[in-house]
């Protein structure tokens, strides 16, 4: 049996996080956890061992998704998909971080989110 691909959701809007969870679960992926802040996600990443992180840019807490993505990329080499309404902050990504960072703009459709996940996980 093939092991399910593992996705961590980092999103401070509960309704959006639940929507993403339903989409990913419906596609047969394992959701390792839903976290509302970058700090908690970074604490849980070693335990959860996701294959990809789906993250909003604006999060609860002191750190934003851009900070977390930089650390995830540097320390764990895990790809990140931003799902956010904020596009102007993407210019802050440096070349070290942006290699495995993808973007889906809110509001998204299930098809767009599904395509992004499949594209990232196929690499």
Image (spheres, rainbow, N blue to C red):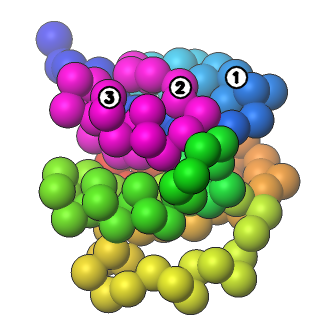
Q: Is residue 12 left or right of residue 53?
A: right
Foreground of the two, 7 or 59: 59
Q: Name the residue tied to disc 1.
A: 18
| Residue extending furthest toward the right | 107
Q: Is residue 61 above or below residue 2?
A: below
Instruction: Tell me if residue 47 is in the magenta stretch.
Output: yes
Q: Name the residue tied to disc 2.
A: 34
Q: Is residue 61 above or below residue 96?
A: above
Residue 108 percent coordinates (x, y):
77, 52
Disc 2 element = strand
Foreground of the two, 64 or 52: 64
Kindly report the distance in space between the C-alpha atoms of the residues bearing marks 3 and 2.
10 Å
Residue found at x 65% / y 42%: 60
> Magenta part of the protein: which range?
30-53
**Dots 2 and 1: beta carbons under 8 Å?**
yes
Quadrant of residue 86 in the image? Answer: bottom right
Q: Is residue 104 visible?
A: yes
Residue found at x 28% / y 25%: 48
Q: Earlier in the sequence, mark 3 or mark 1?
A: 1
Mark 3 or mark 2, whichever is nearer to me: 3
């Amino acid at each position: 049996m093939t092991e399910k691909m593992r996705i961590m959701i980092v999103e401070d809007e509960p309704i959006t996080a639940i929507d993403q969870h339903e989409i990913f679960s419906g596609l047969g992926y394992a959701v390792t956890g839903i976290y509302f802040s970058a700090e908690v996600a970074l604490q849980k990443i070693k335990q959860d061992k996701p294959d990809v992180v789906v993250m909003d840019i604006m999060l609860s807490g002191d750190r934003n998704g851009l900070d977390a993505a930089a650390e995830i990329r540097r320390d764990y080499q895990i790809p990140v998909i931003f799902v956010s309404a904020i596009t102007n902050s993407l210019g802050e990504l440096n070349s070290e971080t942006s290699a495995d960072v993808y973007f889906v703009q809110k509001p998204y459709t299930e098809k767009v989110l599904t395509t992004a996940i499949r594209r990232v996980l196929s690499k």
